[in-house]
Amino acid sequence: MDHRRADPRGALVRPYAVTRGRTEPLQDIALEAVLMASSTQVAESRFAGHDKQRIATVCEGRAQSLAEIAAYTRLPLGVARVLVADLVADGLLTLHTAAPAEGFEERMEMLGRVLSGLRRL
Amino acid sequence: MDFAGYDPAGARESRGIISAKIVVAGGFGVGKTTMVGAISEITPLTTEALMTAAGVGIDDPSKVPGKETTTVAMDFGRITMAQDLILYLFGTPGQTRFWFMWDEIIRGAVGAAVLVDTRRITDAFAPLDYFENRNLPYVVALNRFDDAPQYEAEEVREALAIPPDVPLVMTDARHRESVKQVLVTVVEHAMLRLEAEHGRGFPTPVG
């Protein structure tokens, strides 16, 4: 878990009504980290509230980044991050890794795959 | 459910989908969204972040009822490279007052392309300064507008004081193949940088 108390983006008021005023996500989630939901997870998300259900539905059977979730649901990024982190904590969304930030071998392998992926385009 | 908890050391390393991102930076109206759109498999999407105009970290929002909020929009695109590998392209907000947002966008990125419009070359100073002070590999891409004065790459390098180890490429942000070349340059440069840093002892060209 990553508490970012020194977040320079400041406090947000009304938009955070859907998170009941919480502005701190349970865990930090990168913009590009992808999330997926199975049909079971989507079904269970019905009990988590309207916005969370919308998020789970966006991710049903397909990988969607936090940024995509925010764009498709038209939720501000910070709000989407709080709700997504809740869903992950409740087992209603599956979080996949963003690119490995550390480890020379892992990072080189990832870069090599991105490079060949680009060249194939 | 494997991910029922959020123990950061836990299931995280299980085989999952890796997503990487490359940042497209530059001044306002330089063609960042055009560039993202030229290669993205989806029409570029917009995510909005909200912040107080003051931009000061405050724990209790109820203490600041009158604060103005500002919306910062960033555009991004996506390239699905394999079932388990997705590349995202994020454009930075153009206005310099939103730079604190850039810190979040570049976190964990492969690298960045700084797009420069040769008609308004001074607009590039601020974004270039930003990247010079970050440990993120970046390349400079000169976006060729039809009516723009044509400069030699080296003239631009000199005018913008771009360090010799930073790649400088010409591009047409409207064309997929051209944009692809810019992104290839970013990744190649990131790999070289990483190797140089890893190898230490080797002379690393530092600007």
Image (cartoon, coloured by chain):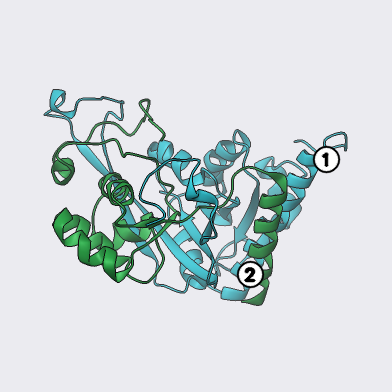
Residue B59 in view here: yes
Whole-percent x and y of residue B2?
Answer: 41, 55
Q: Chain letter for cyan, please.
A: B
Up-down relation of residue B101 to residue B79 (above or below): above
Identify the mark at residue B199; answer none if there is no mark: 1
Considering the image in quadrants, where does the N terminus of chain A appear?
top left
Whole-percent x and y of residue A17?
Answer: 13, 42
Q: Chain of mark 2?
A: A
Q: Amino acid at mark 2?
A: Leu
Is B153 in front, or is A73?
A73
Would you name the residue on which mark 2 appears? A118
Are both tags, 2 and 1, on one chain?
Answer: no
Residue B26 in view here: no
Find chain A in the image and tell me its colour.
green
Whole-percent x and y of residue A23?
Answer: 25, 36
Residue drawn at 23 percent across, 54 percent down: A75
As drawn, the residue found furthest toward the front would be B1
Residue drawn at 63 percent across, 37 percent down: B135
Is B205 in front, or is A108?
A108
| Mark 2 surroundings within 10 Å by alpha-carbon count, few (fewer than 14), some (14 through 19), many (20 or more) | some
Discs 2/1, front:
1
Whole-percent x and y of residue B156?
Answer: 68, 50
Tell me: A54 left or right of B193. left
Q: Circle 1 sits in a helix, a strand or a loop, which is it?
A: helix
Q: Amino acid at mark 1?
A: Gly
Q: Circle 2 sits in a helix, a strand or a loop, which is it?
A: helix
Marks 2/1 in contact by CB < 8 Å: the verdict is no
Tell me: B39 left or right of A79. right
